[in-house]
Amino acid sequence: MGGSCAHTEPASSSSESSTGAPEPVCGDGVVGGEELCDGAGFCLGVCPTGALTLENRETVPISKMATDLVNGIVAVEDERFYEHNGIDPIGIVRAAVSNLKGGDRQGASTITQQYIRQTVLRDEAYDISYARKVREAYLAMEVEKRHTKREILEFYLNTIYLGEGTYGAEAASRAYFAKAASELSLAQAALIAGLAQSPSRLDPYVNPDGAIARRNEVLDAMLSNGYIDKKAHGEAVATKLSLKRTKDPSDGVYAAPYFVAHVKKQLQQQFLQKDPHQ
């Protein structure tokens, strides 16, 4: 990761603050640096507040997220979210039948299960064993006993990875539309909701046609579930894609988000405890 990066005063050998919590890691792997550069010295990320954050996440209450975004996520990811207790038996049967018939492969994970997979069980996210699935289902039901549906949606929408190095609705809204999650239009909200399925493959900067097709699937789901009417659906489907990245991203990443994300992952493993909300 060479390059002529500028650095502030080197940090002490300890990566913990006076409170005992790990300090933010910045620069090209050095705690307290200002820039992350490639081998030619091109700046990929800067630290506007003295720290290149390890995850581009800005936690906001669900009241500060567009209603269309919340409804879009429910409609396309878990249409019976408000009816189940953490697992969706109907969805499991539907997915099994579809998969047996050789149709498009479908999953049956609820929003609550997805939240568990990305937090408590994130080290086992790619484990497809029966034991992991049982643990996931059990923990999802326990979360449903302890939290309201609105709280679970807030947890999920602040945790989920949505591409371009962003975690959560607020960071994604700023990365794709340079606005707060509360300000998203219906078409914009549907596009972000659609990214949950496959954020890298559907990245609108890289695959605009795929992102628009998925956005329209979200809009179809919102229409069929009664969240929007035909007029709103038609207008949103006809909306052209117009992307705008925040000029000064809060996480300091300006270019090569995949590479920077890889570097961040290495630094997380080296400096931070395994806390999904760090």
Image (spheres, grey):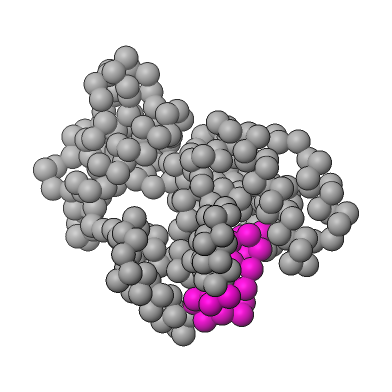
- Give, as a single range, the part of the protein colored magenta: 72-90
* Residue at the image position 56 percent from the left and 60 percent from the top: 101
Viewer-closest of 38 and 223: 223
* Residue at the image position 44 percent from the left and 42 percent from the top: 165
Which residue extends farthest bottom? Answer: 145
- Residue 85 location, x and y as percent? 52, 81
Does residue 266 sit above or below 71 in this rendering?
above
Asked if one can make out residue 63 in the rendered structure from this viewpoint, the answer is no
Viewer-closest of 126 and 102: 102
Number of marks in picture: 0
Considering the image in quadrants, where does the N terminus appear?
top left
Horizontal side of residue 157 vs 271, given as left or right: right
Which residue extends farthest right? Answer: 231
- Residue 254 location, x and y as percent? 46, 30
Horizontal side of residue 58 vs 173, given as left or right: left
Considering the image in quadrants, where does the C terminus appear?
bottom left
- Residue 99 location, x and y as percent? 52, 60
Asked if one can make out residue 29 in the rendered structure from this viewpoint, the answer is yes
Does residue 239 sit above or below 118 in this rendering?
above
Which residue extends farthest top? Answer: 40
* Residue at the image position 69 percent from the left and 51 percent from the top: 217
* Residue at the image position 54 percent from the left and 55 percent from the top: 102
Does residue 249 sit above or below 159 in this rendering?
above
- Residue 135 location, x and y as percent? 33, 74
Viewer-closest of 132 and 168: 132
Which residue extends farthest front? Answer: 101
